[in-house]
Image (cartoon, rainbow, N blue to C red):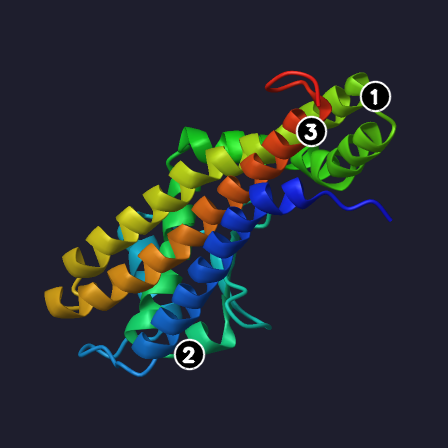
Amino acid sequence: MFFDPLYLLFVLPGLGLSLWASARVKSSFKKYSKVRTARGLTGAEAAQVLLRGAGITNVKIVRSHGVLSDHYNPVSKTLALSESVYGSDSVAAVGVATHEAGHAIQHARHYAPLWVRSALVPTANIGSSIGYFVMMIGVFMASTNMVLVGAVLFSTVLLFQVVTLPVEFNASNRAKALVVEYGIVTAQERKGVDAVLNAAALTYVAAAVSTLLTLLYFLWRSGLLGGRR
C-alpha cells in the first residue's frame, strides 16, 4: 500500500501537540482533583451557583457516565457532569463544572460564536466523515478536482474548530471570573482552576492545528498548493 513520508512531516507536529495537550489535561485534572476547595461546594453545586447568578432557571444539571465527558446540550438545556466532577468538591471539579455552566450562560446570552458553532455541526459532521477520504482518493487518482472537492468538505471541520476556540475560551474566562466573584473558590484556589481550564483549552487549539496541517498536506501533495507534485 502506498505510503508518503511527506505525510508524517505534515501531521507529526499536530499529533505531538495533541498528545502534549492531552497529557497536560490529565496531569492538571489529576493534580487539582486532590485539592479540596475551602467552601466545599461540589461541581454540581458550583455550576448551580453560576446559573442562578445569571438568572438561569431552566437548565437541568445531571450526572453523566465517562471520564471528563462533561458537556452542555443547548437543545435539551442540560448540563451533564461526569462522575469525577458532579459530586466532587475539588478545585478541578469546580473548574470543569463552571466552565460548562459558562456555556449555558453563553446560550442564554445569545453569544454569537456559540450559535454559529451549533449551526456548523451538521456540515462539519459531513466534512469529517467524507472530506478526508475524498482528498485521499483524489491524490491516489491524481485528480486535483477531487482533492479540491474533498478539501472544501474537510475545510468545514477546520471552520468548526476555529469557531470553537472563542466559544471555549470565553466559557473558561467567564468561569474563572465568576468562581471568585461568587466566592466559590479563593483567589489562591483560582490558580488551580486556571491551570485545569488552560490545559483543556490547549486541546482545542491542537485539534485545529492538526486539521489545518492535514488539509495543507493534501493541497500540497495534489499540487493545489505550491505547484505541481
Task: Tell me how far mark 1 sits from mark 3, CA to CA.
Answer: 11 Å
**Residue drawn where x is 43% and y is 70% of the image:** 26
Q: Do we see residue 133 in this rendering?
A: yes
Q: Residues within 10 Å of mark 1 (few under 14, many from 20)?
A: some
The label on residue 46 is: none
Which is nearer the eye, 1 or 19? Answer: 1
Relative to 10, is 84 on the left or the right? left
Q: Secondary structure at mark 3?
A: helix
Residue 189: horizontal and vertical position, in percent?
18, 70
Residue 100 vertical placement versus 95 (above, below): above
Residue 178: horizontal and vertical position, in percent?
22, 54
Residue 102: horizontal and vertical position, in percent?
36, 50
Image quarter of the C terminus: top right
Relative to 204, is 48 on the left or the right? left
Q: Earlier in the sequence, mark 1 or mark 3?
A: 1
Residue beneath label 1, please?
143
Closest to the camera, between mark 1 and mark 2, is 1
Q: Amino acid at mark 1?
A: Ser
Task: Tell me how far mark 1 sits from mark 2, CA to CA.
Answer: 54 Å
Task: Tell me how far mark 3 sits from mark 2, CA to CA.
Answer: 50 Å
Label total for image: 3
Closest to the camera, between mark 3 and mark 2, is 3
**Residue drawn where x is 28% and y is 63% of the image:** 195
Q: Residues within 10 Å of mark 2 (few under 14, many from 20)?
A: some
The label on residue 87 is: 2
Q: Amino acid at mark 3?
A: Arg
Which is nearer the eye, 136 or 78? Answer: 136
Residue beneath label 3, please?
221
Q: Earlier in the sequence, mark 3 or mark 2?
A: 2
Residue 74: horizontal and vertical position, in percent?
54, 45
Q: Residues within 10 Å of mark 3 (few under 14, many from 20)?
A: many
